[in-house]
Image (tube, rainbow, N blue to C red):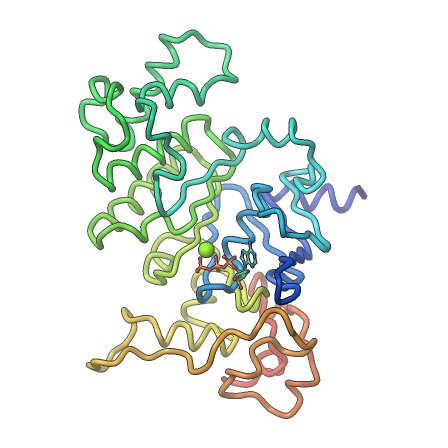
Amino acid sequence: MTGETQNRNREKVLSIKDLSVNFKTENGLVQALRRVSIDIPPKQIVGLVGESGCGKSTVINSILRLLSNNAEIIQGSIHLQNKNILMMTSTQLRAIRGKRISVIFQDPMTSLNPALSIGRQMTDIQYRDQINQVAKRQRAIDMLTRVGIPDAEKRLKSYPHQFSGGMRQRIAIAMALIMEPDLLIADEPTTALDATLQIQIIELLKTLQKEFRCSVLFVSHHLGLVADFCDQVVVMYAGEVVESGNVRDIFHRAAHPYTKRLLECDPARIKTKTRVLPTIPGYIPDLVNLSDDCIFKDRCHVKDNKCPLTVAPLTELTPGHFVQCHLSQEGENL
Ligand SMILES: Nc1ncnc2c1ncn2[C@@H]1O[C@H](COP(=O)(O)OP(=O)(O)OP(=O)(O)O)[C@@H](O)[C@H]1O
Ligand SMILES: [Mg+2]
């Protein structure tokens, strides 16, 4: 690695560069990610948004090296500080999972074992630490208390099914943070919860992120939560990053036609009374047969005759605000 690359990586907890991932299927190669680059700076919350199927979970599974067997990483790197996760051995991966990078999913049962008590799981996860069982148990109690589990000491004996959905997600958060990771990945952590619980969980994550000083990669379809919770936002469309910037750039100065349409379709932002929720006309393109030009051109309301000819590079409009659209790069007000 060159000195310059090392310096750049030092300012980031995680840096994804030019990542392309295909899935082999009976119908051909699904080009799920194409040249995706995402930087996660220290102590920042980065939101990852985009319609269903645009590649958010594939990004996360690539970071965690949990891609399915039919996946093929075509190119790119994922640096955790100065180490490329894509080059790590399984021993090196085990050393970082749960310790330097941890994850919470939409369904907390994905990270909790239904057959073991919460106390057992919370102490087992500390297996790398050279402290005695009493200290591990105490740490588990403290962590459960911090995430708002009442009477945590008594509840250590309980099993996951003995908690409500919201409480289970709190426990999953406690498990994810107990080893004080550098990066917490949250893939739609509140989608299965009702509106009040969603806000409670986000408030909890906000508080804990400040206390633990970790970075967060937050995937959500709920743009209101992203606006409220995140510092930076990355917008993906059909396997590509089409725009990224700080939360104000994206929510107040969106430059890509897709980001604009996505915001217009957000129920929380619709000002006129309507019984029909707006949607972006058309569908995500078939990721098997892709052309090399603008990925959004078939659904774009402002495209011109240059669009099918040009793949605009991701270009910095203002410091930190990147967009992949030649029209917005030319200063058009879309
Ligand atoms: N194992 C797989 N085999 C084949 N195609 C896959 C596989 N996993 C994902 N895909 C495809 O890759 C694309 C990206 O999927 P991904 O799950 O990353 O999207 P997503 O943005 O997380 O969607 P959602 O918001 O619905 O969770 C989709 O076209 C999906 O069908
Ligand atoms: Mg997903």
Image location of residue 86, percent across then percent down: 68, 42
Residue occupying image coordinates x 56% and y 52%: 59
Height in image: 115 above or below 3? Answer: above
Tell me where residue 150 sits by quadrant. top left
Image location of residue 144, percent across then percent down: 29, 26
Residue occupying image coordinates x 32% and y 20%: 119
Residue 2 or residue 138, whichever sits in front: 138
Locate residue 330 relative to residue 226 in the image: left or right.
right
Tell me where residue 309 sits by quadrant. bottom right
Q: In the current view of this chain or complex, which residue is farthest to the bottom? A: 305
Height in image: 245 above or below 211? Answer: below
Residue 161 or residue 52, whichever sits in front: 161
Image location of residue 166, percent across then percent down: 24, 41
Tell me where residue 65 sits by quadrant. top right
Q: Quadrant location of the N terminus?
A: top right
Residue 114 or residue 42, whichever sits in front: 114
Across the whole image, how many numbered discs are drawn on residues?
0
